[in-house]
């Protein structure tokens, strides 16, 4: 790698993909014929893919099909367009839950590097890139890496993502891998439970995007009877997260806790916690920004 290598960081979420500058829905749908409108359309390997609208269904891993590779190409295109580039040599910085890091890291690297040199079109503009290297960092750690120097000797990072809840102890500025825990209890599971209750009580569901909008800013023009269920279930969900933290032996009044990810704002608004020892990082791009920071530091060591 040389001084012209560009770092692009991507947080491949089940609900949305994040780079250091963009957030877009993790939705991929192949179009069997040439589209009439090319907004959010990828053309790759003679095929057309429409990005967005509805998120992908959660699977065991993200390397089972082409979907997350296509989303990676979109992330690359968006970042390169912002930089005014169409051709580049890349260092991709991505993340995995720490508890699955060892088991999935090698497969994820092979998956993202499989083409090496790749040419594709996004919104009818051609990009030609060489993925020279992929570096993988722990999710959650990426979101807090810029504030490790401010943390006490022992701290806790809680990353509430779309599908997973990662609880990461940090001791002397480093993650304690042996004590990290991942639960499949991300925000998607909360949304699913909201709709179960809506069906049970009102015999009707709410569109997932409407629920997400309501959770972000209270919008979405949702009737009061549905809002009541949403708020009740979100409070229940937040209580479950706090229960996990307590069960793991952490004192909520004494432990320095950093909540990150899409669910950090839910904890702040609905968990009823007011302790000064708690910090909320609500920027959903926080992990991607951290991956970028770590990768650039790594790249600088190679250039010396």
Image (cartoon, rainbow, N blue to C red):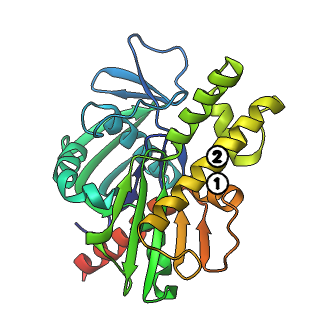
**Residue at (76%, 36%) from the top-left corner?**
227
Residue 171 sits in quarter: bottom left
Q: Position of residue 146 (x, y in %)?
A: 48, 77
Residue 2 visible (yes or no): yes
137 sits to left or right of 266? left
Specify the label residue 234 is tagged with. Answer: 2
86 sits to left or right of 193? left
Element assignment for label 2: helix
Specify the label residue 136 is tagged with. Answer: none
221 sits to left or right of 47? right
From the viewer's perspective, is the residue at label 2 or at label 1 nearer?
Answer: 2
Q: Position of residue 73 (x, y in %)?
A: 37, 40
Residue located beneath label 1 in the image: 266
**Residue at (24%, 83%) from the top-left corner?**
304
| Contact between labelled residues 1 and 2, with CB atoms less than 8 Å apart | yes
Q: Taking 139 as reference, is 31 above or below it? A: above
Q: Which of the marked residues, 2 or 1, is nearer the chain's N terminus?
A: 2
């Amino acid at each position: 790698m040389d001084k012209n290598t560009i770092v692009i960081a991507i947080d491949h979420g089940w609900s949305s993909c994040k780079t250091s500058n963009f957030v877009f829905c993790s939705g991929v749908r192949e179009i069997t014929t040439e589209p009439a409108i090319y907004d959010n359309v990828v053309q790759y390997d003679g095929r057309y893919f429409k990005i967005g609208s509805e998120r992908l269904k959660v699977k065991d891993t993200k390397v089972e099909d082409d979907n997350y590779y296509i989303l990676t190409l979109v992330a690359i295109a968006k970042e390169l367009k912002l930089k005014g580039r169409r051709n580049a040599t890349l260092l991709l910085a991505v993340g995995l839950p720490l508890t699955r890091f060892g088991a999935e890291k090698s497969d994820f690297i092979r998956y993202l590097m499989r083409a090496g040199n790749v040419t594709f079109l996004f919104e009818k503009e051609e990009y030609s890139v060489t993925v020279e290297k992929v570096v993988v960092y722990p999710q959650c750690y990426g979101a807090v890496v810029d504030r490790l120097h401010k943390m006490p000797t022992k701290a806790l990072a809680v990353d509430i993502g779309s599908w997973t809840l990662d609880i990461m102890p940090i001791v002397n500025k480093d993650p304690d891998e042996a004590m990290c825990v991942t639960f499949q209890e991300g925000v998607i599971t909360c949304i699913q439970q909201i709709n179960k209750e809506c069906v049970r009580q009102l015999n009707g569901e709410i569109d997932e995007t409407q629920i997400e909008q309501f959770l972000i800013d209270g919008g979405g023009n949702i009737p009061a009877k549905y809002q009541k269920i949403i708020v009740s279930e979100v409070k229940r969900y937040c209580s479950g997260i706090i229960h996990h933290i307590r069960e793991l032996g952490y004192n909520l009044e004494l432990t320095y806790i950093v909540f990150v990810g899409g669910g950090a704002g839910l904890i702040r608004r609905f968990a009823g916690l007011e302790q000064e020892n708690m910090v909320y990082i609500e920027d959903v791009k926080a992990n991607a920004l951290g991956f970028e920071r770590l990768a650039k530091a790594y790249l600088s060591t190679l250039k010396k």
